[in-house]
Amino acid sequence: MSKSKYITFTIGKTKRIALIAHDGMKQKLIDWCDEHKEILQKHFLCGTGTTARLITEMTGLPVKAYNSGPLGGDQQIGAKIVEGDIDFVVFFSDPLEAQPHDPDVKALLRIAQVYDIPMANNKSTADFMITSPFMDSEYNHDVINFQANVMARVESMQKKPE
């Protein structure tokens, strides 16, 4: 990989984990958090509205709450990824229910991909991620060098056709 196209970021030993679940999957995420409570309590947790509050109430884990998904919570989580304040996402989505805020969900999925953030959208993937050796160590990952990307685009637009 060319270093000019990418910048290496480090996900710290203490992960900043976003916890999100659609209504039909909230209990499954709560149960998952309770099952992995010993690991999760070593990390900073945040989540969207109702999900964050329910996890805190039902597991005792401290979870910083943002807005609920339909009221902009997914976008808030996405913004925190861009700002470098979230580096791990567990999002139990409901594949069988239409979601009124589906464009927001797709935007969150996209931004997690762009910033190379680990993201689980079901219990199996979340189980693999939470039990990974990387949970107890730093992890370096390469992210697109957006400043270099923008400069290259500007330069290509400034070139006059001959």
Image: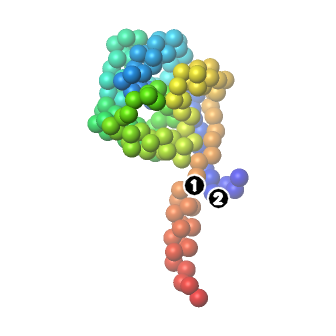
- Which numbered circle lies on residue 145? 1
Marks 1/2: CA–CA distance? 7 Å
Q: Position of residue 101 (x, y in %)?
A: 34, 39
Of callouts 1 and 2, the N-terminal one: 2
Q: Residue furthest left?
A: 71
Which amino acid is tagged 2?
Ser
- Which numbered circle lies on residue 135? none
Q: Quadrant of the C terminus?
A: bottom right
Q: Quarter-wise, where is residue 128 in the image? A: top right
- Which numbered circle lies on residue 4? 2
Judged left or right of residue 60, residue 139 is right
For image coordinates 54% across by 16% down, the residue present is: 39
**Classed neighbour count for the residue bearing mark 2: other residues with Cα under 10 Å, few (<14), some (14–19), many (≥20):** few
Camera-nearest residue between 44 and 123: 123
Mark 2 falls on what kind of element? loop
In the image, is residue 47 above or below residue 37? below
For image coordinates 39% across by 22% down, the residue present is: 24
Judged left or right of residue 2, residue 57 is left
Q: Quarter-wise, where is residue 104 in the image? A: top left
Does the residue at mark 1 contact the one at mark 2 (Cβ under 8 Å)? yes
Q: Position of residue 92 (x, y in %)?
A: 46, 26
Mark 1 falls on what kind of element? loop
Which amino acid is tagged 1?
Asn
Question: What kind of colouring is applied to the model shown?
Answer: rainbow
In the image, is residue 55 above or below residue 70? above
Q: Position of residue 115 (x, y in %)?
A: 54, 45
For image coordinates 71% across by 52% down, the residue present is: 1
